[in-house]
Image (cartoon, rainbow, N blue to C red):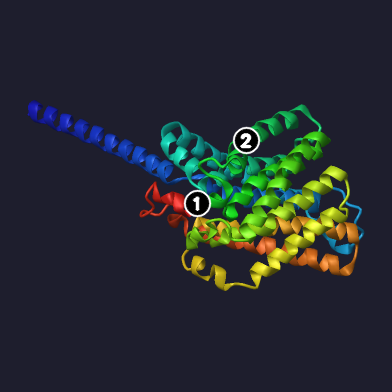
Amino acid sequence: MECATQKCSKSNIKLVIIEKNTTNHKSTSLIVTILTKFHAGYFRISLSLGGQALLWKTLIIEPTKDTNTLRHMFHMLPSSVFIVLWSVSLFILTLLSILYLLRCLYFFKMVKSEFLHHVGVNYLFAPSISWFLLLQSAPFIAPKTITYLILWWLFAVPVVVLDVKIYGQWFTKGKRFLTTVANPTSQLTVIGNLVGAHAAARMDWKESAVCLFSLGMVHYLVLFVTLYQRLSGGDRLPVLLRPVFFLFFAAPGVASLAWESIVGDFDTFSKMLFFLSLFLFISLVCRPALFKRSMRRFNVAWWAYSFPVTVLAMASTNYAQQVKGTVSHIIMLIFLALSVLVSFSLTVFTLINSKMLLPDNDHPTASLLIV
């Protein structure tokens, strides 16, 4: 009888050990699956949320000389709305950053594959851009503090390093010269410099701001002409990536904000960039057939719609503050409403289709095609 009891207890112990090993194996397998399918393209989400945080900080927290009733209504909103939005953005960006750091540690070859991919390499700018946006919208870090300065350098260094590598290849005609690799996502390289310039100007580092602004704008002109004349292989983009065409009007929109922060006024040059951004937006919106096939099934690439619209909303807000006219405030209201609608809709779609964020048929090497 005692032997039977001992055998039962041993078998139970074995079952418990097997169950624990199975659970641990499943957890490890899940983490490996996430890290192998995760890529820098997922930072589109943090770009969108970071842009929204900066937009609503401008509307709710920052002082304004605009006497329009609409702006005063926004100032009456509780600051807790902005703080909650910023906190959610920080949490998501931190989570994405941790996942990508783990991917770099354990699957460095996949990160290297992203770097060598003509689309994937451009999204390596997205983490720094996202952190720049959150830094500028931070409710507890003043621009002229040592903390802000240290963080700015921490986010600016990766941008400059990537600039040297990518822009160097463009003009020296290396393995990846511009006419063969240029595509709409290449504008993220420009946006990275312009957002960095905007952040630098806020702490009165005018020289650094002008430096990054000049780097971004010169290469934007070259890139814009290349894409406009169809000199590159931009047509080779997968259908799922059609939403990244919205980056065409994001770059001049960010440039208008950056230049305003440098000179301290939404002057004629800022207005020119804003109008260019507005024109490119209208040109794309008038061609819905371009995006029809990419909208058939939810994909993380849909988040590429949000950040550019948010940038245009921020630029229209500053434009309305400068012009102080009825038409300018109507434009501001339209883009504010559109920005909130797009971001909210994408959040809902993402929550509903959360299982499709890392699809089972998304092979690690194939994932680069839908960056």
Question: At 87% across and 57% down in the image, what residue appears?
Answer: 321
Query: In the image, 4: left or right of 47?
Result: left
**For mark 1, what is the residue?**
371
The answer to whether residue 6 of the structure is visible from this angle is yes
Question: Height in image: 207 above or below 293?
Answer: above
Q: How far, Cα to Cα, is label 1 from label 2?
A: 22 Å
Question: Height in image: 359 above or below 1?
Answer: below
Query: In the image, 124: left or right of 192?
Result: left
Q: Give the amino acid at mark 2.
A: Val
Q: Does the residue at mark 1 contact the one at mark 2 (Cβ under 8 Å)?
A: no
Foreground: 315 or 88?
A: 315
Foreground: 116 or 65?
A: 116
Q: Earlier in the sequence, mark 1 or mark 2?
A: 2
- Tag 2: Cα neighbours inside 10 Å, few (<14), some, or many (≥20)? few
x and y percent of residue 66 in the render?
A: 90, 57
Question: At 73% across and 48% down in the image, what residue appears?
Answer: 54
Question: Height in image: 2 above or below 343?
Answer: above
Foreground: 192 or 68?
A: 192
> Disc 1 vs disc 2: which is toward the camera?
2
Q: Give the amino acid at mark 1.
A: Val
Local secondary structure at mark 2: helix
**For mark 2, what is the residue?**
164
x and y percent of residue 108 in the render?
A: 44, 34
